[in-house]
Image (spheres, helix red, strand yellow):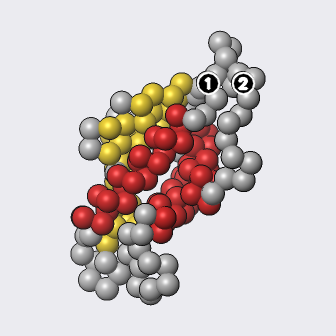
């Protein structure tokens, strides 16, 4: 999974906050989809490789084994697919902005008490919106956020 941020440089506090909330959301996704058992030690480690090109910061995420440091490609793929689907479903439930930007005053259909995963997904969305232009991509699918614009491909 790749997260792209524009423009760079970016404030360290934004990047730190984004990585923390993404890590928590991925962990919650892994627990909710039973890919990882929270009661067992030696949990997989989430790794990030950062690269910059054309004023765009790309963060490539993957999981690795804590003992061998080997990439866990199958586990990474499964967790990222579940996260991407959950995040896609979450952003589809957001209120549509009005003509001038703020959300329209339609009745909120969300649950009064969101699940831990929903809370984490809300945090990911909030952090991505703080950045002028951001995108999460997995394989050929993308979720792009730029201001009030949200695009799913």
Q: Quadrant of residue 71?
A: bottom left
- Number of numbered markers: 2
- Which residue sits at x=31%, y=72%? 64
**Residue at which label 2 appears:** 106
Q: Quadrant of residue 77?
A: bottom left
**SS type, badge 1:** loop
Q: Position of residue 107 (x, y in %)?
A: 73, 29
Q: In what quadrant of the picture does the C terminus appear? A: top left
Residue 146 shown left or right of residue 73 in the figure = right
Relative vertical location of residue 117 with respect to residue 131 in this rendering, above or below: below
Residue 108 quadrant = top right
Q: Is residue 42 left or right of residue 20?
A: left
Q: Is residue 45 at least partly visible in the picture? A: no
Above or below, 8 against 1 in this view is: above
Is there CB contact under 8 Å for labels 1 and 2? yes
At a point 24% along the width and 64% down the height, the residue shown is 73
Residue 2: % across, % down: 36, 48
């Amino acid at each position: 999974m790749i997260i792209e941020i524009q423009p760079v440089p970016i404030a360290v506090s934004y990047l730190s906050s984004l990585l923390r909330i993404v890590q928590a959301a991925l962990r919650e996704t892994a627990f909710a989809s039973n890919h990882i058992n929270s009661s067992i030690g030696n949990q997989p480690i989430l790794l990030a490789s950062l690269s910059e090109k054309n004023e765009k910061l790309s963060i490539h995420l993957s999981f690795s084994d804590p003992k061998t440091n080997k990439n866990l490609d199958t586990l990474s793929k499964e967790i990222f697919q579940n996260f991407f689907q959950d995040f896609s479903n979450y952003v589809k439930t957001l209120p549509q902005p009005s003509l001038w930007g703020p959300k329209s005053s339609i009745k909120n259909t969300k649950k009064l008490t969101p699940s831990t995963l929903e809370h984490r997904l809300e945090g990911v969305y909030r952090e991505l919106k703080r950045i002028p232009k951001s995108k999460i991509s997995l394989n050929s699918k993308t979720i792009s956020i730029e201001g009030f614009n949200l695009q799913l491909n």
